[in-house]
């Protein structure tokens, strides 16, 4: 029997030079250590991270993953309480979920779906301090009824900013301590990496820093900037669909701050996490956001898992808080 064609943005394991044995229980990523030249600064050395076979099978071959947030809890949010975040994961560039975008739509099994994310958090946290809440987001494959592939977990933190409401208008005050941090684990609780929201002198530019399993900084995720780095630059141009309106957060090498090249399945695009236009009905009737992630060329499965966590934290700190998820104080 011939092997089925790969999903868009993915490659078959048989295309690799050394296929992963089917009987393997765990796959260990080998890390190449560069020799140290006398007088030079040694680069951080990353220890091999034991990964489950499911992670290697699902994330390993993918160059692009689409993250589609569902409109879960629209009625709950209408009364001022933040609902649990829910996402569906697709391999490659998938702009619209096949089963509709509005509450009450048919949610039967989607054959193109490769993963499912559903936030687990206390109800009181979401109602009274949603911008500071703690949560866990397990990723199950291929849908909500599948096995757990990995976990993303965030502890209680300060919001990225506070808004002071006064008679003369609002004052936006950034927070620069105890900022949101999301840690990523395998299903057997092996630490994979983490992502932290960054506060620096460029307060108007949202940015995240991604770390590996040894807490070495690997990537800086931020949009392009103008005005000497003080303001973010939105995407421009209108090709079709999501190309009309988007905000790309490019993945930069942390040591050089150069934008990293995207994987081959990214169709020549640089590595990035992009918030895309989800369609008129979805944008007007819901608060759900769509993203796609172009992984860096040659990135390991462990870093791909950490970047999925970066996507969840980006939605929480930037796109959720813009709708009032931050701490609000009045006087």
Image: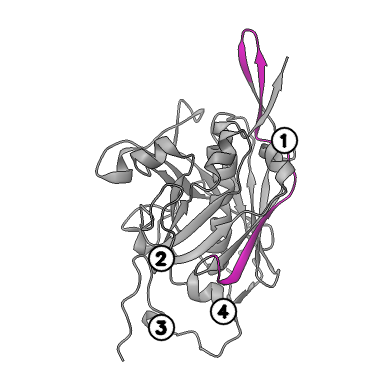
Return the residue found at the far front: 104
Give residue 128's mark.
Answer: 1
Q: Residue at x 42, y 80 (%)?
A: 13
Gap in Å between the C-alphas at discs 3 and 2?
31 Å
Gap in Å between the C-alphas at discs 1 and 3?
53 Å
Gap in Å between the C-alphas at discs 1 and 2?
35 Å
Q: Earlier in the sequence, mark 1 or mark 3?
A: 3
From the viewer's perspective, is 232 left or right of 204? left
Q: Residue at x 59, y 29 (%)?
A: 203
Q: Circle 2 sits on which residue?
A: 110
> Foreground residue, 24 or 40?
24
Give the quadrant of the N terminus: bottom left
Asked if the stretch drawn in magenta spans residue 147, the answer is yes
Q: Earlier in the sequence, mark 2 or mark 4?
A: 4
Tally of numbered tags: 4
Return the residue found at the far left: 239
State the SS at label 3. loop
**Residue 107 location in percent, x, y?**
44, 59
Q: Earlier in the sequence, mark 1 or mark 2?
A: 2
Answer above or below: position of 325 versus 267.
above
Answer above or below: position of 267 versus 281.
below
From the viewer's perspective, is 190 left or right of 30? right
Question: For the magenta stretch, what is the residue range?
Answer: 144-171
Can see residue 254? no
Give residue 17's mark.
Answer: 3
State the SS at label 4. helix
Q: Residue at x 55, y 29 (%)?
A: 204
Q: Circle 4 sits on which residue?
A: 53
- The quarter holding residue 235 reads top left
């Amino acid at each position: 029997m011939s092997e089925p064609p790969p999903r868009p943005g993915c490659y078959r394991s048989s295309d690799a030079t050394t296929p992963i044995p089917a009987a393997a229980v765990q796959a260990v990523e080998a890390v190449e250590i560069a020799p140290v030249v006398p007088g030079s600064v040694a680069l951080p050395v990353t220890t091999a991270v034991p990964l489950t076979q499911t992670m290697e099978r699902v994330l390993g071959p993918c160059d692009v993953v689409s993250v589609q947030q569902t409109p879960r809890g629209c009625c709950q949010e209408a009364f001022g309480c933040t609902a649990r975040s829910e996402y569906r994961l697709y391999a490659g560039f998938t702009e619209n979920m096949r089963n509709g975008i509005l509450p009450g739509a048919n949610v039967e099994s989607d054959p193109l779906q490769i993963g499912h994310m559903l936030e687990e958090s206390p109800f009181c946290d979401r109602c009274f301090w949603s911008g500071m809440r703690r949560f866990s987001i397990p990723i199950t494959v291929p849908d909500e009824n599948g096995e757990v592939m990995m976990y993303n977990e965030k502890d209680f933190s300060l919001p990225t900013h506070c808004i002071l409401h006064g008679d003369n208008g609002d004052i936006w005050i950034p927070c620069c301590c105890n900022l949101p941090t999301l840690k990523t684990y395998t299903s057997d609780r092996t630490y994979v990496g983490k992502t932290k929201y960054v506060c620096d002198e460029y307060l108007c530019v949202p940015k995240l820093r991604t770390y590996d399993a040894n807490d070495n900084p690997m990537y800086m995720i931020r949009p392009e900037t103008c005005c000497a780095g003080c303001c973010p630059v939105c995407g421009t141009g209108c090709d079709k669909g999501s190309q009309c309106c988007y905000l790309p957060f490019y993945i930069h090498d942390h040591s050089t701050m150069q934008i990293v090249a995207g994987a081959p399945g990214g169709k020549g695009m640089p590595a990035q996490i992009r918030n895309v236009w989800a369609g008129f009905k979805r944008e007007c009737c819901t608060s759900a956001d769509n993203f796609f992630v172009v992984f860096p060329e040659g990135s390991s499965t462990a870093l791909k898992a950490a970047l999925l966590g970066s996507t969840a934290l980006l939605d929480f700190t930037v796109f959720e808080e813009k709708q009032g998820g931050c701490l609000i104080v009045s006087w």
